Image (cartoon, rainbow, N blue to C red):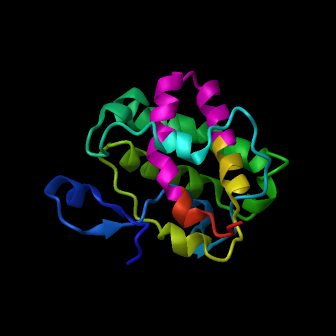
Amino acid sequence: MTRDLVPDRESARNGSRGMTMPSFFRTMVLVGAGWAAGAGALAQTATVPTVAAVAALATAAPSDDRLYQALGQQAGLQALMEDFVPRLLADARIGVFFKETNRDNLVKQLTDQLCQESGGPCVYGGAPMRLAHQDMEITKKDFNALVEVLQISMQARGIPFRVQNALLARLAPMHRDIITVRP
Protein backbone atom coordinates (compact mmCIF):
# COMPACT_ATOMS: atom_id res chain seq x y z
CA MET A 1 0.00 0.00 0.00
CA THR A 2 1.12 3.55 -0.61
CA ARG A 3 0.91 6.47 1.76
CA ASP A 4 -1.54 8.46 -0.32
CA LEU A 5 -4.38 6.01 0.23
CA VAL A 6 -7.19 7.12 2.49
CA PRO A 7 -8.86 5.08 5.25
CA ASP A 8 -12.06 3.33 4.25
CA ARG A 9 -15.26 3.98 6.22
CA GLU A 10 -14.92 0.96 8.49
CA SER A 11 -11.29 1.75 9.26
CA ALA A 12 -12.14 5.37 10.01
CA ARG A 13 -14.89 4.26 12.42
CA ASN A 14 -12.85 1.69 14.29
CA GLY A 15 -9.45 3.40 14.10
CA SER A 16 -7.73 0.53 12.29
CA ARG A 17 -5.18 0.95 9.53
CA GLY A 18 -7.20 -0.71 6.72
CA MET A 19 -6.89 1.37 3.56
CA THR A 20 -8.76 1.77 0.30
CA MET A 21 -8.36 4.05 -2.68
CA PRO A 22 -10.99 6.71 -3.33
CA SER A 23 -13.25 5.85 -6.19
CA PHE A 24 -14.90 8.69 -8.10
CA PHE A 25 -13.00 9.08 -11.34
CA ARG A 26 -12.13 5.42 -11.80
CA THR A 27 -15.52 4.97 -13.42
CA MET A 28 -14.44 7.33 -16.16
CA VAL A 29 -12.71 4.40 -17.82
CA LEU A 30 -15.31 1.67 -17.50
CA VAL A 31 -17.01 0.44 -20.64
CA GLY A 32 -19.20 -2.56 -20.05
CA ALA A 33 -16.72 -5.25 -19.09
CA GLY A 34 -13.78 -3.43 -20.72
CA TRP A 35 -11.82 -0.21 -20.42
CA ALA A 36 -11.81 3.07 -22.32
CA ALA A 37 -9.86 6.27 -21.96
CA GLY A 38 -11.14 9.12 -19.82
CA ALA A 39 -10.35 12.63 -18.62
CA GLY A 40 -9.04 15.13 -21.13
CA ALA A 41 -6.97 18.25 -21.20
CA LEU A 42 -8.90 21.35 -20.21
CA ALA A 43 -7.92 24.74 -18.92
CA GLN A 44 -8.51 25.53 -15.29
CA THR A 45 -10.73 28.57 -14.86
CA ALA A 46 -11.35 30.92 -11.99
CA THR A 47 -14.63 29.12 -11.27
CA VAL A 48 -12.85 25.85 -10.52
CA PRO A 49 -11.49 25.67 -6.97
CA THR A 50 -7.99 24.36 -6.51
CA VAL A 51 -7.62 20.83 -5.23
CA ALA A 52 -6.16 22.13 -1.95
CA ALA A 53 -9.02 24.60 -1.45
CA VAL A 54 -11.66 21.95 -2.06
CA ALA A 55 -9.93 19.44 0.22
CA ALA A 56 -9.96 22.00 3.02
CA LEU A 57 -13.77 22.13 2.83
CA ALA A 58 -14.29 18.53 3.94
CA THR A 59 -16.21 18.49 7.19
CA ALA A 60 -18.13 15.23 7.59
CA ALA A 61 -17.03 11.60 7.47
CA PRO A 62 -18.44 9.51 4.60
CA SER A 63 -20.49 7.50 7.13
CA ASP A 64 -22.51 10.68 7.76
CA ASP A 65 -25.37 10.74 5.26
CA ARG A 66 -26.17 14.48 5.46
CA LEU A 67 -24.47 15.12 2.12
CA TYR A 68 -26.30 12.19 0.53
CA GLN A 69 -29.58 13.63 1.81
CA ALA A 70 -28.69 17.15 0.61
CA LEU A 71 -27.96 15.80 -2.87
CA GLY A 72 -31.46 14.29 -3.06
CA GLN A 73 -30.49 10.73 -2.21
CA GLN A 74 -30.33 8.13 -5.00
CA ALA A 75 -32.83 9.94 -7.25
CA GLY A 76 -31.01 13.26 -6.93
CA LEU A 77 -27.64 11.70 -7.69
CA GLN A 78 -29.10 9.83 -10.66
CA ALA A 79 -30.53 13.10 -12.02
CA LEU A 80 -27.18 14.85 -11.49
CA MET A 81 -25.32 12.14 -13.39
CA GLU A 82 -27.97 12.16 -16.15
CA ASP A 83 -27.06 15.84 -16.57
CA PHE A 84 -23.29 15.47 -16.07
CA VAL A 85 -22.51 12.56 -18.41
CA PRO A 86 -24.05 14.10 -21.56
CA ARG A 87 -22.21 17.36 -20.82
CA LEU A 88 -19.00 15.40 -20.43
CA LEU A 89 -19.54 13.53 -23.69
CA ALA A 90 -20.50 16.70 -25.59
CA ASP A 91 -17.83 18.99 -24.19
CA ALA A 92 -15.47 19.95 -27.02
CA ARG A 93 -12.54 20.02 -24.60
CA ILE A 94 -13.06 16.62 -23.00
CA GLY A 95 -15.63 14.62 -24.98
CA VAL A 96 -13.07 12.89 -27.17
CA PHE A 97 -11.76 11.00 -24.14
CA PHE A 98 -15.18 9.42 -23.60
CA LYS A 99 -16.07 8.59 -27.20
CA GLU A 100 -16.02 4.82 -26.55
CA THR A 101 -17.65 5.01 -23.14
CA ASN A 102 -20.96 3.28 -22.55
CA ARG A 103 -23.13 6.21 -21.46
CA ASP A 104 -25.66 4.22 -19.44
CA ASN A 105 -22.97 2.28 -17.61
CA LEU A 106 -21.08 5.48 -16.83
CA VAL A 107 -24.23 7.11 -15.40
CA LYS A 108 -24.91 4.06 -13.21
CA GLN A 109 -21.33 3.68 -12.00
CA LEU A 110 -20.99 7.37 -11.19
CA THR A 111 -24.35 7.41 -9.42
CA ASP A 112 -23.31 4.47 -7.23
CA GLN A 113 -19.92 6.00 -6.58
CA LEU A 114 -21.25 9.43 -5.60
CA CYS A 115 -23.88 7.74 -3.46
CA GLN A 116 -21.19 5.86 -1.57
CA GLU A 117 -18.84 8.84 -1.35
CA SER A 118 -21.61 11.10 -0.03
CA GLY A 119 -22.50 8.69 2.77
CA GLY A 120 -25.39 6.89 1.08
CA PRO A 121 -26.14 3.17 1.20
CA CYS A 122 -24.77 2.32 -2.27
CA VAL A 123 -21.72 0.17 -2.82
CA TYR A 124 -19.45 1.05 -5.70
CA GLY A 125 -17.40 -1.84 -7.04
CA GLY A 126 -15.33 -0.28 -9.82
CA ALA A 127 -11.62 -0.54 -10.49
CA PRO A 128 -9.11 1.28 -8.26
CA MET A 129 -8.45 4.79 -9.53
CA ARG A 130 -4.69 4.43 -9.63
CA LEU A 131 -5.03 1.39 -11.89
CA ALA A 132 -7.76 2.93 -14.05
CA HIS A 133 -5.75 6.08 -14.71
CA GLN A 134 -2.14 4.87 -14.66
CA ASP A 135 -1.56 5.07 -18.43
CA MET A 136 -3.73 8.09 -19.18
CA GLU A 137 -1.23 10.92 -18.62
CA ILE A 138 -3.70 13.02 -16.63
CA THR A 139 -2.51 16.39 -15.39
CA LYS A 140 -3.84 18.59 -12.60
CA LYS A 141 -5.31 20.76 -15.34
CA ASP A 142 -7.22 17.75 -16.72
CA PHE A 143 -8.56 16.83 -13.30
CA ASN A 144 -9.74 20.38 -12.64
CA ALA A 145 -11.41 20.51 -16.06
CA LEU A 146 -13.60 17.53 -15.26
CA VAL A 147 -14.48 19.19 -11.95
CA GLU A 148 -15.57 22.25 -13.92
CA VAL A 149 -18.03 20.17 -15.96
CA LEU A 150 -19.35 18.63 -12.74
CA GLN A 151 -19.83 22.11 -11.26
CA ILE A 152 -21.79 23.21 -14.31
CA SER A 153 -24.09 20.22 -13.89
CA MET A 154 -24.56 20.90 -10.19
CA GLN A 155 -25.42 24.53 -10.92
CA ALA A 156 -27.85 23.47 -13.64
CA ARG A 157 -29.56 21.11 -11.17
CA GLY A 158 -29.90 23.91 -8.60
CA ILE A 159 -27.66 22.27 -6.02
CA PRO A 160 -26.77 24.87 -3.37
CA PHE A 161 -23.19 26.12 -3.48
CA ARG A 162 -22.39 24.81 0.03
CA VAL A 163 -23.58 21.32 -1.00
CA GLN A 164 -21.49 21.53 -4.19
CA ASN A 165 -18.44 22.41 -2.09
CA ALA A 166 -19.11 19.56 0.35
CA LEU A 167 -19.28 17.05 -2.52
CA LEU A 168 -16.15 18.44 -4.16
CA ALA A 169 -14.38 18.23 -0.80
CA ARG A 170 -15.20 14.53 -0.61
CA LEU A 171 -13.91 13.96 -4.13
CA ALA A 172 -10.79 16.17 -4.01
CA PRO A 173 -8.45 13.65 -2.32
CA MET A 174 -8.83 11.42 -5.36
CA HIS A 175 -6.46 13.67 -7.26
CA ARG A 176 -3.54 11.73 -5.79
CA ASP A 177 -4.60 8.61 -7.68
CA ILE A 178 -5.93 10.27 -10.84
CA ILE A 179 -3.22 12.79 -11.70
CA THR A 180 -0.47 10.73 -13.30
CA VAL A 181 1.64 13.54 -14.80
CA ARG A 182 3.48 15.63 -12.20
CA PRO A 183 5.31 18.87 -12.99
Q: Is residue 172 magenta?
A: yes
Q: Against 1, is 174 above or below? A: above
Residue farthest left in this picture:
14
Residue farthest right in this picture:
92
Q: Nearer the viewer, residue 116 or 182?
A: 182
Residue farthest front in this picture:
183
Residue 81's spot in the image, x, y percent? 57, 42
Q: Residue at 72% across / 41% down in the picture?
A: 87
Q: Residue 33, can we see it?
A: no
Give the main secondary structure of the magenta stretch.
helix
Q: Residue at 48% across / 25% down in the picture?
A: 162
Residue 150's spot in the image, x, y percent? 62, 40
Locate the C terminus by quadrant. bottom right
Residue 161's spot in the image, x, y percent? 53, 24
Q: Residue at 78% across / 56% down in the picture?
A: 41
Q: Is residue 150 magenta?
A: yes
Locate the N terminus by quadrant. bottom left
Q: How many numbered discs sit on the rendered protein?
A: 0
**Magenta-drawn segment:** 148-174
Q: Residue at 43% across / 60% down in the picture?
A: 22
Q: Against 178, is 118 above or below? A: above
